[in-house]
Amino acid sequence: MTLNAAVENGQPGYPWLVFLHGFSGDRDEWRTVGEAFPAWPRLYLDLPGHGGSADIAVDGFTRVSELLQATLNSYNILDYWLVGYSLGGRVAMNFACQPRAGLRGLIVEGGHPGLQDEASRLARRGNDSAWAERFRREPLAQVFTDWYQQPVFASLDAAQRASLVALRRRNNGATLAAMLEATSLARQADLRPSLQARDFPFHYLCGERDTKFRAIAQALAVDIHIIHHAGHNAHRDNPAAVIACLAQILAS
């Protein structure tokens, strides 16, 4: 089994850019950024429970990593960068914590490396379970209206929130709920030790208004790139700055 994907061909000799979207997004989320790199072959994935992979159910990060590896194998991708936002960043970090032939490096935007104590995990488990129940039972427009009131999205204005609600309401609530629980931060290991022992480049992007993830980034031994005029979803808020940042990373 493989994940649903869209492919854009590049020029011979360039590594692949493999893009992973955030929770409730889909393979089109990174398109605006990816299209700025026509020389690089690009793979845009739908994560389990999302888009064309909505019918794929998983029980945790191990299975997501297996599906990601199977998908890379199916396209014969042997030389690549992983680029992930939020949930996609967590998937990328989990994946990269095991030896991966061909992985050039990791580019993560606003991804959490893991909770560090049991009390935080218990609180997160309860929070994610409550959201999952709402995704299963309530109209998605109503749930996402509340979802985007969470503190991590505090930098959004009313128009930005309305635009995101209109976009995300197209999802399948039941499959979103299943993926939310399967990949809850409560179920994710603390990846910091593995990431700090890595032997590949790791670049971390975060919006200047994303105070939570700027603090998280500062505690990681990584190259940090602050995206100006942006919040948690930096590549949506300021795609030009993210494109410039990726161009700098890929040229280094």
Image (spheres, rainbow, N blue to C red):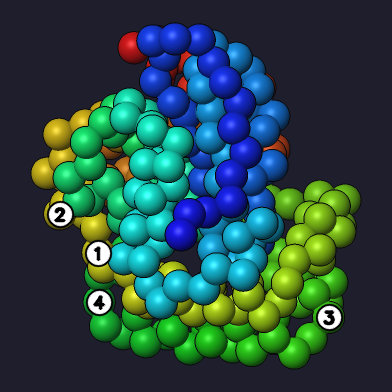
Indicate the quadrant where residue 191 lies.
bottom left
For marks 1 and 3 on the same chain, the one whose residue lies earlier in the sequence: 3
Q: Amino acid at mark 2?
A: Pro
Q: Residues within 10 Å of mark 3 (few under 14, many from 20)?
A: few
Q: Amino acid at mark 4?
A: Asp
The answer for how far apart the CA atoms under marks 1 and 3 are is: 34 Å
The answer for how far apart the CA atoms under marks 4 and 1 are is: 9 Å
Coordinates of residue 49 in the picture (x, y in percent): 59, 67
The answer for how far apart the CA atoms under marks 4 and 3 are is: 34 Å
Question: Is 45 on the left-hand or right-hand side of 144?
Answer: left
Q: Residue at x 34, y 12 (%)?
A: 252
Q: Nearer the viewer, mark 4 or mark 1?
A: 1
Q: Looking at the image, is 85 positioned above or below residue 79?
A: below
Local SS, label 1: loop
Q: Residue at x 43, y 42 (%)?
A: 74
Residue contact between numbered discs 4 and 2, judged by CB atoms under 8 Å: no
Taking the image as drawn, is residue 58 in sight?
Answer: yes
Local SS, label 4: loop
The residue wearing badge 4 is 117
For marks 3 and 2 on the same chain, the one whose residue lies earlier in the sequence: 3
Taking the image as drawn, is residue 161 in sight?
Answer: no
Task: Pick the residue in front: 127 or 175.
Answer: 175
The residue wearing badge 1 is 190
Q: Residues within 10 Å of mark 4 (few under 14, many from 20)?
A: few
Question: Is 182 on the left-hand or right-hand side of 80?
Answer: right
Q: Looking at the image, is 42 positioned above or below residue 116?
A: above
Coordinates of residue 26 in the picture (x, y in percent): 66, 51
The residue wearing badge 3 is 139
Coordinates of residue 73 in the picture (x, y in percent): 37, 41
The answer for how far apart the CA atoms under marks 2 and 1 are is: 8 Å
Number of numbered discs visible in the structure rendering: 4
